[in-house]
Image (cartoon, rainbow, N blue to C red):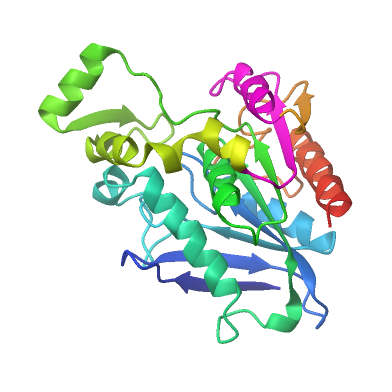
Amino acid sequence: MKVNFVVYPAHGRPFTADATFAQDGQPKPVVIFTHGFKGFKDWGHFNLLARYFAEQGFMFIKFNFSYNGTTVADDSDVHDLEAFGRNNFSLELDDLEALIDLLNDTQGPLQQKELNLNNLYLIGHSRGGGAVILKAAEDPRIKAVATWAGVSDYDQRWAPGVMEQWQREGVQWVANSRTGQQMPLYYQLVENFEQNKNRLSIPQGLTKMQQPLLILHGEEDETVPLEAAHVLKQHKPDAELHLLPQANHSFGGKHPFEDNELPEPARIAADLSIDFFRRHA
């Protein structure tokens, strides 16, 4: 079954989430799936992914970051570009915290008897890979983490000229090749990063985090360089690393996704993650 619900974080902008699981009254390990930059919870094959994990005995929860450009009224795609522009990395960590807190709330939308919160796992795709590492570093409730095509640092090292123009104009525009939208990034993203560098340093987070880490990266990734996977491993030598031949950045997915079965690279990534989580239960 699928339960849709809304999360109300302390910063005040609510966001949508859903849980897919077999309702059998038995406590199930919980996987929270975290989308990346320009992503959203129902992108492409993510609903098939949820079903796949549920069939393997997990509760699979995916959500929209509060400032990802969706709204509670319409979370079918990214359309609130003003909100998108006001997103930052600290807000994303706060969203994850609010979601985990809600799962632990006996009055929350999910019945506690269906949840085994002693086995709470995070998967982060792309930029979401950074969020799940940093959240694990500061939240012992998380049991293990997997990154799928995860970034190794938030500091994108934009050219000085770009940074100067961004600061001067207060906004940088990024193209969404799928929709043709010009999406704003307000300079507050940089200011927030600078003000919270210790909390938002992925390399530092990797050295702090005690939980097991699985690093998955496609050898055909066209968005996040393969080197990022090696950098993650370098900062956490006990991490498990798998490079997937024939896998691109989205592990074979696209939006919209018309097939009824997971793309093969996504299924392989799911199987590797399921095996990893079971070994670290």
Residue at 40% over, 67% down: 9
Q: Nearer the viewer, residue 261 or 92?
A: 92
Q: Nearer the viewer, residue 251 or 116?
A: 116
Residue placed furthest toward the bottom:
107
Residue 185 position, x and y percent, is 27, 36
Q: Which residues are magenta?
A: 209-236
Residue 68 shows in the view: no
Question: Is residue 21 one of those drawn in magenta?
Answer: no
Residue at (53, 39) in percent of width and height: 130
Magenta-colored stretch includes residue 218: yes
- Image spot of residue 79 (x, y percent): 33, 50
Counting from the top left corner in percent of width and height, residue 31 is at 69, 58
Mark yes or no: residue 156 visible. yes
260 to 230, vertically: above or below: below
Horizontal and vertical percent for residue 78? 38, 48
Please report the residue visible at 44 percent of the width from the left and 43 percent of the height from the top.
Answer: 199
Q: Is residue 149 above or below residue 52?
A: above
Question: At 61% from the left edge and 36% from the top edge, which residue is drawn?
Answer: 206
Residue 148, quarter of the rendered image: top right
Viewed as shown, does residue 111 lie left or right of 139?
right
